Image (cartoon, rainbow, N blue to C red):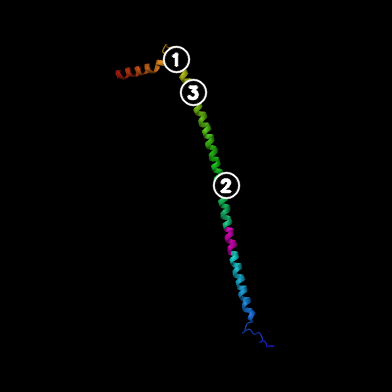
């Protein structure tokens, strides 16, 4: 059998160097893992922020679409009211025209004639 040399501080054990390298490598991998974990947490926070922003934008869009529909309904209702009012006013005006003995079908030409006369008098 070969005689072993005693282990002295000046002369490290042959496996001690490998063990130190492994410890350093594990420490380095732990640090990398920690950094990756922090990076992952930041990315998850960004994704959550983006999702929240998307939900808010989607809710705003839905609100705007609802307001647009409501506005169109109100606009149609107002347009119908105005149309009915104008029809009533027109009917009342035609009744007044008939009550003074004029023919409503000829009122347009009569009005043109009056406008022409008015223009000549100026």
Mark 2 highlights which residue?
55
Work out whether mark 2 precedes mark 1 in sequence or the reverse, and give the earlier one: 2
The image shows residue 33 at horizontal and vertical percentages of: 60, 65
* Mark 2 touches mark 1? (CB < 8 Å): no
- Secondary element under disc 2, as helix, strand or loop, is helix
Residue at image position (44%, 15%) is 96
Quadrant for the N terminus in the image: bottom right
Q: Residues within 10 Å of mark 3 (few under 14, many from 20)?
A: few
The image shows residue 40 at horizontal and vertical percentages of: 58, 59
- Secondary element under disc 3, as helix, strand or loop, is helix
**Which label lies toward us, 2 or 1?**
2
* Mark 3 touches mark 2? (CB < 8 Å): no
Q: Residues within 10 Å of mark 2 (few under 14, many from 20)?
A: few
State which region is magenta: 35-42
Image height of 90 relative to 13, above or below: above
Tell me, for residue 96, which label it has, or none. Answer: 1
- Secondary element under disc 1, as helix, strand or loop, is helix
Distance from disc 3 to disc 1, alpha carbons, whole Å, reads: 16 Å
Work out whether mark 3 precedes mark 1 in sequence or the reverse, and give the earlier one: 3
Q: Main secondary structure of the magenta part?
A: helix
On whether residue 54 falls in the magenta region, the answer is: no
Work out whether mark 3 precedes mark 2 in sequence or the reverse, and give the earlier one: 2
Q: Is residue 78 left or right of residue 19?
A: left
Image height of 111 relative to 4, above or below: above
Tell me, for residue 85, which label it has, or none. Answer: 3
Query: Which of the 4 quarters of the picture holds residue 115?
Result: top left
Query: Which of the 4 quarters of the picture holds residue 28?
Result: bottom right
Image height of 65 relative to 119, above or below: below
Distance from disc 3 to disc 2, alpha carbons, whole Å, reads: 45 Å
Tell me, for residue 32, which label it has, or none. Answer: none
């Amino acid at each position: 059998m070969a005689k072993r040399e005693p282990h002295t501080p000046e002369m490290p054990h042959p496996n001690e160097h490998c063990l130190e390298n492994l410890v350093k490598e594990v420490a380095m991998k732990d640090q990398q893992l920690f950094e990756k974990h922090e990076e992952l947490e930041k990315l998850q926070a960004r994704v959550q922020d983006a999702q929240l922003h998307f939900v808010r934008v989607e809710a705003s869009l839905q609100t705007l679409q609802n307001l647009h529909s409501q506005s169109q309904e109100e606009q149609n209702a107002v347009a119908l009211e105005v149309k009915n009012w104008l029809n009533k006013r027109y009917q009342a005006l035609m009744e007044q025209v008939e009550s003074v003995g004029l023919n409503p079908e000829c009122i347009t030409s009569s009005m043109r004639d009056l406008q022409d006369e008015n223009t000549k008098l100026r």
